[in-house]
Image: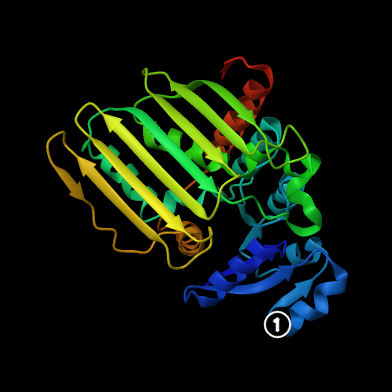
Amino acid sequence: MIRYGIIGFGAWGRCYADAIRKLPEVTLIGIAVGNSDTVNNIRTEYPDVTVVADYHELLRLNDLDVAVVSVPNHLHFRIGFDVLNAGKHSLIEKPLALTVKDCETLFQTATEKNLYLAVGHQFRLSSLWGKIKELIDSGRIGEPKYALIELSRNPYRTGEDGWRYDKKRVGNWILEEPVHFFDLACWYFELFGKAVSVYATANTCLSTDSELYDNLSAVVHFSNGSYAVITQTLAAFEHHQSVKVTGTKGSLWAAWSGAMDRTRHPEFFLKISDGNNVTEINIEKPAGELFELEEQIIQMSRVIRGEAKIHCTGSDGCRATALSIAAQKSAQTGEEVKL
């Protein structure tokens, strides 16, 4: 039984708590809510869990195995660093940190202390998006040469105290969600080449801050000549994501749609073609953030027991952050940014 604690208890922290409590091989032993005014309310909701306002108290629990860091982006580094220095394994929500230097420090600290550090890029554990990786690696479409990763959705939730609309706390909106898609592109192409440059263009129609981009399109070039197009709009409705990949022997197309990102009743499909025939791939498990969150908890537990590998390492998290920061720079300067 792997014992979890959660640091940060906004909407996503609650999703973590619900996932941990329903899974049979893990248990939730502590929550750090970050607000002393709400401690008693959370204790009433979770009477069998230690609830504190100061996350340092949580880290002092001797039986804590893993701390989940689910706080606003600007706190990921400071709290993640404290978790690792307390000798606890850590699952840190994306982005790993707001700077590449801080990402590298977290990765190095975990390595030096022989601790597991996983990053919350849960799409890697998706029954849908993960199946694409499996098909690419098995050679079904040959060498991938092009990918399109697209998201059309409603505007972001503001987050507690409006942090997601505060540039100092969110970093930028590329780090808030497209960071997932940069990670996916690198993951899909990792057997064939490394990301070498990014060019991005962006604008805003909903935000009062011109650097918080509602609309973004970026082209990532890889060392083998392949490239990926990542495009997002936050000025649309519902939540619709698609991935298309073409290779030297075929192509594939996957799509996911829901009324919102956290629905448990989405529509999704995956099709593959060898150039002549189109086949729909059966996806046995449901796909979506909430299901993938549960898979993250299970995967981390198996890592600690020596039964699996980390789905997204600190090194992977560094790369996704670096690409997101490079895309932000490119959108601001209008120039391609080398990595």
Residue 175: image location, x then y, percent: 64, 39
Q: How is the image coloured?
A: rainbow
Q: Is residue 109 above or below residue 338?
A: below
Residue 167 picture location, percent across and down: 77, 39
Name the side, left or right, on which 84 lies relative to 304.
right
Q: Is residue 106 above or below residue 146?
A: below
Q: Quadrant of residue 30?
A: bottom right
Asked where in the image residue 249 lies, by quadrant, the reply is top left
Quadrant where the image shows the C terminus: top right
- Between 89 and 55, which is closer to the camera in this rendering? 55
Would residue 309 be seen by someone viewing this image from the given angle? Answer: no
Q: Quadrant of residue 133?
A: top left
Q: Which amino acid type corresponds to the residue marked 1 in the rendered image?
A: Glu
Number of numbered markers: 1
User: Residue drawn 58% across and 33% down?
Assistant: 216
Against 6, residue 113 (above or below) is above
Q: Tell me what residue is drawn at x 60 percent, y 44 percent.
A: 234
* Outermost left residue: 276
325, 304: nearer the viewer: 325
Q: How far across and how far down the image is residue 60, in percent? A: 76, 65
Mark 1, residues whose alpha carbon is within 10 Å: few (<14), some, or many (≥20)? Answer: few
Question: 109 or 79, which is in the foreground?
Answer: 79
Mark 1 residue element? helix
Q: Which residue is mark 1?
A: 45
